[in-house]
Image (tube, rainbow, N blue to C red):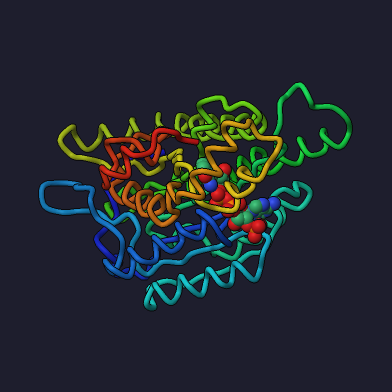
Amino acid sequence: MNNRAAPALLDSGDGRTSLVIITGASRGIGRAIALAISDDVAREGGVGVNVKTDETSAAELLSAPLHMVLISRSEYLLRETAQLVEERGHGLITTSCHQMDLSDLATLDENFKVVLESLSGAAQYNSCWLINNAGSLGPLGKVSIYSGASTMKELRQAVDFNLTSSIWISSQFTQTFLNPLAATDDNTPQSPFVRVVNITSLCGIEPFSTMSIYCAAKAGREMFHRVLALEHSIDNTTESQQFGSNHKQKQIFKTLNYAPGPCDTEMTDILADSSALDENLRKYFVTSKREKSLVKVEDTAKKLVQIMKSDEFESGTHIDYFDDNIADDPISATTHDTRV
Ligand SMILES: NC(=O)c1ccc[n+]([C@@H]2O[C@H](COP(=O)([O-])OP(=O)(O)OC[C@H]3O[C@@H](n4cnc5c(N)ncnc54)[C@H](OP(=O)(O)O)[C@@H]3O)[C@@H](O)[C@H]2O)c1
């Protein structure tokens, strides 16, 4: 795998588009990310542009025109997201919706193949992004109460969805869009590049009582995306040497683990309502909901888009919404002590 100079500014003029696939795009953080990308594309006529490839030119990370693929179980809500994306994208964004249950491993491969096959080849894209966002809490409660077949079934479903299907989606996406690039000698500034963003959580790196399955799945998912980054870092390093040390290169492939902060979504509604959750945690969510102090999905989505645009993150790294070095709003970044 190669490390290459970045694609050209805005639309390259060669008819290629950017591609963004978002799982769990029907509501919550996934929908907010779709809309934040749309707003940025509309504002800039092609999101973009912060990475210098040499003294004078810059590179686009998400350029218009852009095709966005939206995935979840709810067809109605997906169509609603798609409509909002297209309205806000001012003609620069097209969408396609794929209704599927990502927790059903018996159909996952076939269903995701349909998505990938509908995208007609890696060569038509300047940049390919997967936002691996869909997730659920799984069973809550202390490990000491786990017993019985129904708990086992719930546990397996949660792992199937939050870990196995997430791994499968990222691996199939990477094979489809990265392998063809690896097989060519195309090493021009217009060469496409591939990014995988895993939506993780503080729960992926710190334990939270009564959330063991969620924490375990998030930790496993995060480690998978670190390994994926590592497997491609060797190739990236090899080729960056071709360009000399003063030439800042965009790596052809990177992964990012982004923790969005505790957000006001249906997921945290469940936490606030759950008698199985650790009482202090539950109170935190009840109070935060009441005081409206949880992170707004629009804010975290906007921050993610900034991180994506700057492309300065190290492949495989974990970045949290509250991390100082990426905070654009110092007030919101310091007023939240408790993070989930
Ligand atoms: N909210 C937070 O505070 C927070 C904090 C840290 C990390 N996160 C992570 O952020 C991501 C999004 O969370 P959220 O708060 O936006 O959750 P949410 O409001 O519950 O939304 C979850 C999304 O995943 C989709 N989904 C759920 N089950 C699915 C399935 N079986 N197959 C396909 N899609 C499915 C849902 O769509 P359908 O119902 O239409 O299928 C929905 O679009 C998750 O990975 C979560 O772990 C959230």
Q: Closer to the camera, 4 or 21?
A: 21
Residue at 61%, 40% in the rendered image: 167
| Residue 310 spot, x, y in % from top left | 28, 47
Q: Quadrant of the N terminus?
A: top left
Q: Closer to the camera, 293 or 46?
A: 293
Residue at 70%, 38% in the rendered image: 275
In the rendered view, tell whether residue 18 sits above or below residue 270.
Answer: below
**Side (left or right) of 114 relative to 13:** right
Quadrant housing residue 59:
bottom left
Say how many tags the image has: 0
| Residue 97 spot, x, y in % from top left | 59, 67
Quadrant housing residue 233:
top left
Q: Does residue 207 appear in this view?
A: yes
Q: Residue furthest right?
A: 149
**Side (left or right) of 294 relative to 210:** left
In the rendered view, tell whether residue 25 sits above or below residue 241.
Answer: below
Q: Residue furthest left?
A: 55
Residue at 53%, 56% in the rendered image: 28
| Residue 236 spot, x, y in % from top left | 36, 35
| Residue 290 spot, x, y in % from top left | 50, 50
**Side (left or right) of 215 relative to 305:** right
Residue at 50%, 27% in the rendered image: 205
**Side (left or right) of 57 relative to 212:** left
Q: Does residue 170 appear in this view?
A: no
Q: Closer to the camera, 238 or 69?
A: 69
